[in-house]
Structure formats: C-alpha cells, structure tokens
Amino acid sequence: MLDTPDHLLISRAQQGDADAVASLYHRYVQAVTRYIAYRVSDDIVVEDLTAEVFLRMVEGLPHYHVTGAPFEAWLYRIAAARVADYYRERYRYPDEALSDGLRDGHSSLELGVQQREELEELRAALSQLSHEQQTILILRFVERKSHEEVALILNKSVDAIATAQHRALKRLAELLGTEKSRRHYLRGKSR
Amino acid sequence: MNEEFPTSESQELMERLNRAIPPHTTALPEHDSDPQVMAARRLARGPRPLLSETASSRIEAQLRARTRELYPQHHTHPTRVRKIRHWVWRYALAACLIIAILMFGTVQVSASSLPGDRLYSVKRAVENGRLAIVSNAGEPELRTDLAQRRIDEFRLLLARNRVYPPVLQEASDQLNLTLDLLAAGYGDAAVLYRRVFTLAQQQINLIEESAILASPSEWQQLQQLAGRSVVIQTEAVSGQAVYGIPGQALPPVVQPTIPVSDTPLPVMVESPAEVFALSATPTVFSSATPIPGQPTAVKTKVKPQDQAKDDGAPSRTPPGHGPTPGLGNNPPGQGGQNPGQGNNNNPPGQDKPDKPDKPK
C-alpha cells in the first residue's frame, strides 16, 4: 500500500475499500494537520478540522475525477475551506468557550514547549495576512512546495503566486522583524 | 498590486527564495540578509507539528466507519483472505485464458484437417455447432459452405491418391438441403443457386478425375454421386429461372463424361427455359465410354427433338457445333452414328463403361 500510486488508491477507495481510504489518509494526514496547525491555535480544533477534511474526502471521493492536478491539491482546498468556515463561525459566535487544547487529557499535536511558543508566534503573524497569502507561505516554506506546485494547488499562475508571495513576505517581515518591538498582533489587535 | 510589486521584482525575489529555501528539502543552504528572505527562512525553520498517534487513530476509526456507511455493499475482508482471493482469481483467469487459447488454436488447426485425421472430429463438431445456431436465412449459405468444404476435402485426399466418396455424398446432401431451403424462400437465391450449380460441377469434375484411382465399389458410389450432381444442377437451373435475377440464367447442364447409375437420369438441356419445357423426370441418357485409364472430356448433349429422331440412341454433337464446340475429340471410327464422335462401340444405352485399370 505504501508504494501504491494515488490514482490506484483513489480508484479502490471509490469502490468502498476502507484500507485504501486509510492509506490515503495516512499519506496526507500530517501535511494537512501542519497546514491547519499553522492557521488555528487550538489543538482540539486542529484535530477536529483535520478529521473533517478527511471525512469530506471520503464523502467526495465518488465524485472525484483523477486529473493532472495532485490529489493533495484537493485536500488543501478542502482544508482551506474548513479553516475559513471555522473563523467565520468564530466571528459569528465569539463567546463560545475555547477548549484547553487537551482531549482525554492528551494533546492532539506532538510538539515541545519551545516549539509551541515559536509556532504560536509564527501563527499569530500569519493570521495578519489574507487566507490566500497564508496558504501560499505555508505551502511554499513550511511544506517546501515549489512555486509551480503552489500555483497548481491554488489554481493560479506562477506570476500571480510570485506577486502575492512578495506582498505576503513583505508584510510578514514587518510583523516578525522590523515591527518586532511593537508586536501588536500578539496582543490581539486587529490590523 | 502589480504597480506596488512589479513582476520583475517578484520574479527576482522568487529566484532568491529558491536559492535560499529550495523546495522539497529541509536544507537552507544560503543566507540572505533580505528581510523578506529572512522571514521566509524563519517559517522554513519553524516547528513541524505532528498529529499524535492517538488522535490519528481516532480519525482513522471515524473514516472507516464513514466508509462502511457510505459503501455498505463493500465487504471488507481480512487482508489474508483478500490476498488469497486475489490470487485465486488471477490463477482462474490465467487458466481460462490458456484454455481459451488452446481451444481457439485447436479449432483453427482442425479447420484444415481431413477425414482420418485426429482433429477431424473437432472440425465436424464445430460445424454441427454452427448449424445448430444458424438462422433459417443464413442456413442455405452455411450449407453451401459445408458442401464446399467436403468437396475441398475430397480434392485434397485425391491429391494424396485417396478416393473417399462419403465426403462427396455429404456434399451432395448439403446441396440438396440448400436447394430445399432456397425453394422454401430462405437465403439469397440469386447467389446461392449459381453457387450450388458450380459446386455440383466441381463434384462431377472431381469424380471424373478420381476414375483412375477408385476401386470398383468406390467407382459405383461415385457414379451414383455424379448422377445426383447432374440432378442438383438441373434443379439449380430450374430454381434460378424461377427465383434468380432475370437475365442471369445459369449455363446449361452438361452431362458428365462418365456413366452414372442408380440415379434418375438427367435430361440434357440447352437453356433453363428448356428445363420447364421438359418433364421433371429425365428421360434421355447418353454416355461416352471413357478410354480405359484415360477418362475423356467428351460432352454429350441431346435435344428433345433429337430424342424423337434417334429413339433413345446416344448421339453426339459434331465438333464445332453446339454450346461447347470442339469437344468431340474421339478419333474417327470409334463408334457412334456420326463419324468422329464414337462411343467406343458400346451398345446404345450402355451406361457403364469398361472400368479403366485403376492403380491400387
């Protein structure tokens, strides 16, 4: 199963093969989790959104057509939509209590304390960017995709990605470096 | 946007980023003091959170449950059972393929088999299978095909110095059945009457060729078959005149050079029209006695008016006369009433020639 190409796993999963579904899940779960973890701070929410992405994958597989685009592009699009939905709901119901990030007394993410602080700082800076800019930077620099792959996943031209990346990095540099002293974003102020 | 971040500047940044943070690797080879590149490097060096094993198992269980809900008809089997079933299917498929190839090959090889060969029974079984499934409309054509096969078999056996009358007997049976079907309105009459006529002629020719090799008993059978062939030709001419395409009449039936026996004697006719003018029962018979060891190719014809004149005595058309001029090739003085057209001094009406010497 480990070396089975995506299109074969997809074909079998489309026929209801639970093992093929599980293989696709294990192949992409960590990448999808990282993407969501860089955009959402609560571990429980990260796990729930990750589960939701793959449940949507199972439900959408019967209608999925294998094309030239990589399978993960579809998963990233589902993940981006789930994150956007999450923030939309949070904006609508801001008073809902946040969890303590633990489920059954365990964290959903494996991360050290220092790493968690660094992640929190990067996530806070990224959250000041648009959804698309966040996705571009996470895919390009956290997931180490090429610009062409990012363009394929976001269904845009490489030039458009380059321009959006330029703008996003300029802003991120301000947030992380030149404006380090102020760090208003860490105090929860909106732009 | 493009005014603030010209494409060239964005492209340049992209190239610097590709050098400083190459894709598909965790390495960060070049240091770049550009604040934008530094921000990107910080992201690239950032933590890589992993979903815990517990959380991953929880989600996987949800996915499997959802898959079972969505695809209730798909029975998940333990891996070993599925593997065994997979291999059983593969072997079964391979076995079926091999059997199919062997059967196809056997049928192909059997198509060229001859009576006495091991595969001849396979060939006949295939033919019987075709006859069992053919439609009424296609049956006449199939039966003429089978008759052609039998005639070909006889020809090939003859080339090996073997005379085997049963195959010609079956060819005649098939041709008779074809005529019955055509008369009942099945098949393409315009084509098949002509084909039946041609096949019957092929039979006559082969019988003439086999005269030297046939044993007395075989020769007797062949004479009967020659007579049947003439009758078949006569019926084909009649059928063509009734059901065939107007203006495409078959040639007249030509009497074989060998005598025929134990069959209704055929009438020699000039044209299909004369078939109807004459009685259905042949009344005139003529024969040319073959020279022992050398069957002749003499054609004999009798017109109805000549029949009255000659009172049943055999006659011949002089060379250069009639529809097949030049066939009176017996030397003068060899019998018959007309010089040069003898019947080798056989008495009138003799239908059995001196048997030529036949090599055994």
Image (tube, coloured by chain):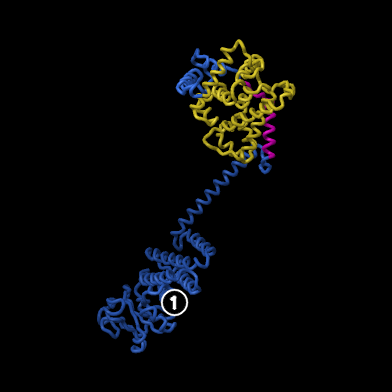
Chain colours: A yellow, B blue
B151 or B248: nearer the eye?
B248
Q: Disc 1: which chain?
A: B
Residue B43: percent from the left, percent from the top?
Answer: 57, 18
Q: Is residue B63 magenta?
A: yes
Q: Secondary structure at mark 1?
A: helix
Task: Look at the picture and state if B197 lies above or below A32.
Answer: below
Residue beneath label 1, please? B242
For label 1, count other residues whose C-alpha is less than 10 Å away and answer few (under 14), some (14-19) or many (20+). Answer: some
Task: Please say whether residue B117 is visible from this viewpoint.
Answer: yes
Horizontally, is B143 left or right of A116 in the view? left
Please name the residue shown 44% across and 76% down the image: B242
Task: Please say whether residue B31 is visible from this viewpoint.
Answer: no
Residue placed furthest toward the front: B3
- What residue type is disc 1 on? Val
Task: Look at the picture and state if B89 lies above or below A175.
Answer: below
Residue placed furthest toward the top: A181
Question: Where's the C terminus of chain B, which quadrant?
Answer: bottom left
Residue placed furthest toward the left: B332
**Highlighted magenta segment, given as a residue range:** B48-69
Residue B93: percent from the left, percent from the top?
Answer: 56, 46
Residue A53: percent from the left, percent from the top?
Answer: 64, 31
Residue A173: percent from the left, percent from the top?
Answer: 55, 16
- Dominant secondary structure (helix, strand or loop) of the stretch shown in magenta: helix
Q: Is residue B85 magenta?
A: no
B219 or A44: nearer the eye?
A44
A11 or A169: nearer the eye?
A169
